[in-house]
Amino acid sequence: MMNIPFHDRPAETIDPTQLAGLQLHRLRASVGHALCTPFYRQRLAECGLPESFTMGALSDLRRLPFTVKDDLRASYPDGLLAVPRDQVVRVHMSSGTTGAPTVIYHTAKDLETWTGLVVRSIAATGVTKFDVFQNMMTYGLFTGGLALHYAAEKLGMMVIPAGPGNTKRQIKLMRDFATTVVHATPSYLLHLYSALENEGVAPGDLALKRAFLGAEPYSESTRQKIEALMGIDAYNSYGLSEMNGPGVAFECVLKAGMHVWEDAYLIEVIDPETLEPVRDGDEGELVFTTLRRQATPLLRYRTRDLSSIIPEPCACGRTHRRITRIKGRSDDMLIINGVNVYPSQIEGVLMKIREAGSNYQIVIEKEGSLDKMIVKTEVSGDLFTGDLRSLEAVRRDIGNRLKTEILIHPSVELHEPGALPVSEGKAKRVVDNRPSL
Ligand code: AMP
Ligand code: ZN
């Protein structure tokens, strides 16, 4: 029998009845916190729930309204802040939404809770203070970098805060410091593997044993490919900034679905059309309610991520239920090398540019293991009769403005009016040529 590592065995193997009691207790507190925000005071009143309303049972959750990303945007900057501002010690924002940001505030206690969840998550894969952790995720407003950074330090690992990119340097750091664990997007790790090959470094020459992979959808075969190529164990990590970030659900050493930390998040799976719960085990949209967050409690937050609950308990002994790998999204959000992009953001930029025509197309392809985005736009015909320099200037300007809005730099192609396909009915703006999961 495989050794099953735990960080906090009593909390991770809590008796399900006891867990339900704890959830109800925490849910009541969360609703109380939520009522401290202008947004939820109004929303709950609209639903006919008086301020004196208390949750009698966990099933009362269904009386609460859903929260969606647009609610967060509309509440910018502090309509969802539930504590006095002097208690806030950090903010994070969702990536790719610079036009209308969604802000999550954290108190010191929130950060401690979050770090605790990530520590529990990574410890479940068997890492210990003897590991050397190279963090290849973005540091900053995006949650992926800092979350794992603090958790790895808390576990006592040596942390290399490398951030993403600069692959040559990553390889040098991995060799010089004998990195044993990395945190990256699956596409970046595959890219790193090609770079290793180019440099003539065999994965066996490295000390690497494990990888935590998340921030974008990927298939089981991608995981297996990475494991086989690099001779490591790769664990799926799921989270979203609205629910802190990483540490919402993580695979244990058995790699059979991700345990959702149900003492911190209430999980529901709904049909995105009818908004009714699906049957246990069926696929639907994940909905989470924060149970332990002070500064930004969120009730029934619709993630738009499609997955399902695995009803059977995991052989590891943890009682927190598992979800399957994320299958996709129930909205049009694109994830490009781990960065979230909405087609509407691109349209917003193009429409503000005088020369850009109304017809455009977003093409996504794989270039090696990384994602590549090409924005094709029609521009006014007179640009093609003038000199090439003005065409190039417009192309650059569009590229730069897109970068400011969506945080990634797409290649931009300019086309003459009428050159791009015109679809009858609903325009097909996005052509995603990446292999399906
Ligand atoms: P962000 O709020 O910027 O951290 O983005 C969160 C989104 O990234 C989630 O809602 C998912 O769509 C996606 N995501 C994060 N982790 C994973 C994962 N392990 N598998 C698939 N998608 C993921
Ligand atoms: Zn398990």
Image (cartoon, rainbow, N blue to C red):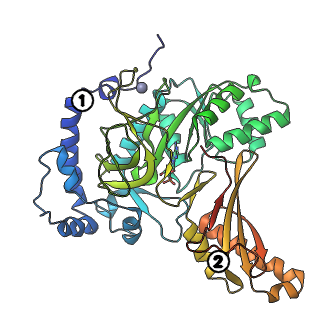
Residue sticking out furthest to the right: 387
Helix, strand or loop at label 1? It is helix
Look at mark 1 in the image and give the residue it sits on.
16
Residue appearing at x 28%, y 46% in the figure: 291
Q: Is residue 155 left or right of residue 12?
A: right
Q: Amino acid at mark 2?
A: Leu
Quarter of the picture for ligand 2? top left
Instruction: Determine the CA span between mark 1 and mark 2.
Output: 52 Å
Q: Amino acid at mark 1?
A: Pro
Look at mark 2 in the image and give the residue it sits on.
350
Q: Is mark 2 within 8 Å of ligand 1?
A: no
Q: Which mark is residue 333?
A: none
- Residues 135 and 255: in front is 255
Residue 326 is situated, as x and y percent measured from the top left of the image, at: 49, 43
Quadrant containing the C terminus is top right
Residue sticking out furthest to the top: 1
Q: Around disc 2, counting alpha carbons within 10 Å, would you say few (fewer than 14), some (14 to 19), or many (20 or more)?
A: many
In this view, 404 is above or below 326: below
Q: Is residue 16 left or right of residue 365?
A: left
Q: Around disc 1, counting alpha carbons within 10 Å, would you say few (fewer than 14), some (14 to 19), or many (20 or more)?
A: few
- Asked if the residues shown at circle 1 and circle 2 are in contact, with their CB atoms under 8 angstroms apart, the answer is no
In this view, 15 is above or below 350: above
Residue 70 is situated, as x and y percent measured from the top left of the image, at: 40, 67
Q: Is residue 113 left or right of residue 59?
A: right
Image quadrant in which you'd find residue 183 = top right
- Mark 1 or mark 2: name the one nearer the start of the chain: 1
- Residues 307 and 142: in front is 307
Residue 155 is situated, as x and y percent measured from the top left of the image, at: 48, 30
Residue 66 is situated, as x and y percent measured from the top left of the image, at: 30, 59
